[in-house]
Amino acid sequence: MPSQETLEALGSEEFMWGLAFGFAALAIGALAIYVWRQWRERPVAIVSLLAAGAAVAASAVAAEPPRELWTGVALLAGAGALYPLVSRLPLLPAALAAPGAWWVTNTVDLPGAGWVPWALLAWIVVGGTLLADFDRHHEGTGYCPLLLVISVAGMFATLPDTEQILVVFGAVLPLAVLSWPRGFAALGPIGVYPLLGVLAWVIAVGGQGRESAVIGAMAALGLLAVEPLVRWWGASTIFDVTSPRWRRFPVIALGHLAVVLLMARGAGLAASPMRAAGIAVAIAAAAAVGLALASGARPEAAP
């Protein structure tokens, strides 16, 4: 059962503002899907754009972010818009996201130790690229938007100051229904980088007073970040096995939830950032091995 503190947080003004903008984005998404499916059968890749828009609008109303943040978010949106054109070129998507990530983490006055902006810069660039790759590889499954909601919930579970993350959580929560149980919409790359840009500011502000929570919140991307690394290494994962999607998803969702909770409550509550980083790396390595073993496949030999 949720604690009384959690129930109060989910009834807060911040969460309600996020939900309001999230449901508005859901209505826009439903209309876009209806129009799209008059001509195309494949999922429309708009969930990240809707999530980023809802998070930005709700944060502007309820969380009072600095104005400089929006310039960085706009630059990151430009990088996301170019992603489909450069996704198959190594490192170029990350390079295009770097200027916006630098703006968000170095122009905006982020609280915390000196390492926090640089860690968040790397998180936006690398995490956004991994997240976009996950969605591109599994576009028709509907996994990514739902797993992203679990990740944002994990950030809420680890950050000591939850006002800002509640806004984003409320904004992304309704959008999960666009992709499950029917995969009408995929996450899409356009909004991935700007959404992580907003979350970077949220993590820095929410992690004040316990810097290990910054590590835990970044690591809450969980399998969304680990799975592409396993594929790049040459192994297939449980996401690629041939069992029916509806039967596979509960296992995947529970596995992702377990990894996110371990990151949030293990790494995020560690005594120091260094210890948190060590715990996060160990959990990610174990998750990578588990993903590969669960598929019954072995890494392919390098040519």
Image (tube, rainbow, N blue to C red):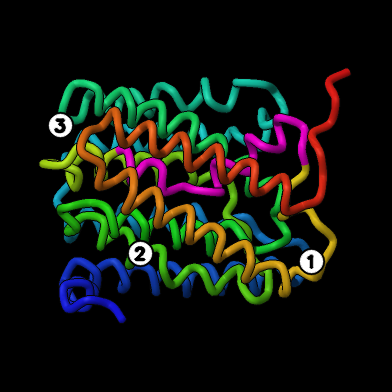
Q: Nearer the viewer, mark 2 or mark 1?
A: 2
Mark 3 sits on what residue? Answer: 112
The reply to whether discs 2 and 1 touch (Cβ–Cβ < 8 Å) is no
In the displayed structure, 298 sits above or below 33; it is above
Q: Could you tell me which residue is drawn at 77 percent across and 52 percent down? A: 295
The alpha-carbon separation of the residues under discs 1 and 3 comes to 47 Å
Q: Could you tell me which residue is drawn at 63 percent across and 66 percent down? A: 251
Q: Closer to the N terminus: mark 2 or mark 1?
A: 1
**Residue 254 seen:** yes
Name the residue type under label 2.
Ala
Q: Considering the numbered disc 2 on the image, is that residue within a helix, a strand or a loop?
A: helix
Quadrant in which residue 102 is drawn:
top left
* The stretch drawn in magenta includes residue 217: yes
Q: Could you tell me which residue is drawn at 45 percent across and 62 percent down? A: 149
Most frequent secondary structure within the magenta stretch = helix
Name the residue type under label 1.
Glu
Mark 1 sits on what residue? Answer: 41
The alpha-carbon separation of the residues under discs 2 and 1 comes to 27 Å
Mark 2 sits on what residue? Answer: 171
Q: Considering the numbered disc 1 on the image, is that residue within a helix, a strand or a loop?
A: loop
Name the residue type under label 3.
Gly
